[in-house]
Amino acid sequence: MRIAVTTPTGNVGQHVVRMLLRGGLRPTVLVRDPARLDPAVRERVDVAVVDQRDRDAVVTATEGVEALFWVNPPAGSDDPAGEYARVGANAAAAVRENSIARTVFLSSIGAEKRHGMGEIDGLARTEEALDDTGASVLHLRCGFFFTNLLMQLDAIRAGVIPIVLPVDHPMAWVDPRDIAEVATLRLLATDWSGRQVQGVQGPEDLSWEQAAAIVAEATGVPLRAQEIPDDEMRRALRGAGMSDGLVEGIMGMSTGQRDGFVREQSRTVVTTTPTTLASWAYSVLRPLL
């Protein structure tokens, strides 16, 4: 079985690659900078040096592929949703032109809303582009990554994480490794077809207030979440060097959840994954603090 994996050094992709290797496969990895691959991994995969923004390169690299794990790479433009949509169109072109039998797409909770979710709107456009191919595709609607906390290390050390959601607003939190497990199992399975959507929601819904308390206990660092006005968050993001378009893309991912949004996939045994925030914070976050 030939399986192609995009973003093989990312939070999810790196685990998908290693799981496929443990399963006895030699995946093809689409990577812009091969030097970022672990040397032990690099010798066991087929490397295609590809910028996912290059349609022709993506199509060429996925010739003969039976299953594709597609992740839109981080957006760097002033229009992140638009960039995601354009990159997603390249995935659809590869699926269509190479008759790829199964595609697993890393989407997000909120994509079902289609509009008003900032960067996630671009994932919604990618879902639609893949759906239009008529091929079999699975959209993984994932919760908030534990690893997003790694971008908040300074705030955690200072004891306060600023957010724009109400501190008691519940949402799904998930370990990217658990997402990789779901993705890998579905890539290896050959008995599904059509358009499917699956939530990947971690073990439980948590508010930022609850999450901060869990992280504090696991790391030994006193921590709380504090809701701040939208404009204050915008100023902070611009102060970090982000363009107005990037700022609005990030803001929308939170503000889009505040108007009575209810996710499409309910919490069931299928959408629930095992790793707790407490165990992840103890093993990953604590050593960094």
Image (cartoon, rainbow, N blue to C red):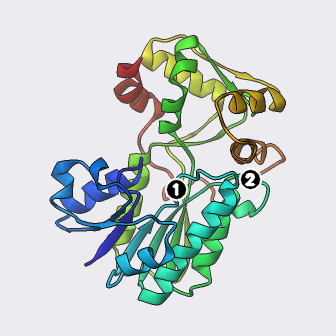
Q: Does residue 43 appear left or right of residue 109 in this picture?
A: left
- The residue pinned by badge 1 equals 271
Relative height, residue 155 to residue 147 (above, below): above
Q: Position of residue 105 (x, y in %)?
A: 50, 66
Q: Does residue 248 appear left or right of residue 120 in this picture?
A: right
The crowd level at tag 2 (other Cα within 10 Å; few <14, some 14-19, many 20+) is many
Image quadrant where residue 280 sits: top left
Image quadrant where residue 228 sits: top right
Q: Does residue 258 appear left or right of residue 213 in this picture?
A: right
Q: Position of residue 157 (x, y in %)?
A: 52, 14
SS for callout 1 = loop
Nearest to N terminus: mark 1 or mark 2: 2
Q: State if disc 2 and disc 1 touch (CB < 8 Å).
A: no
Circle 2: residue type:
Met
Whether residue 80 appears in this view of the structure is yes
Count up the numbered dots.
2
SS for callout 2 = loop
- The residue pinned by badge 2 equals 117
* Residue at figure coordinates x 20%, y 56% from the top left: 42
* Residue at figure coordinates x 45%, y 28% from the top left: 278
Circle 1: residue type:
Thr
Which label is found at residue 10? none
Please tell me which residue lies in front, 263 or 176. 176
* Residue at figure coordinates x 47%, y 80% from the top left: 94
Q: Position of residue 142 (x, y in %)?
A: 55, 53
Relative height, residue 231 to residue 137 (above, below): above
Point out the image quarter for the C terminus: top left
* Residue at figure coordinates x 52%, y 56% from the top left: 271
Please tell me which residue lies in front, 141 or 231. 231
Relative height, residue 92 to residue 248 (above, below): below
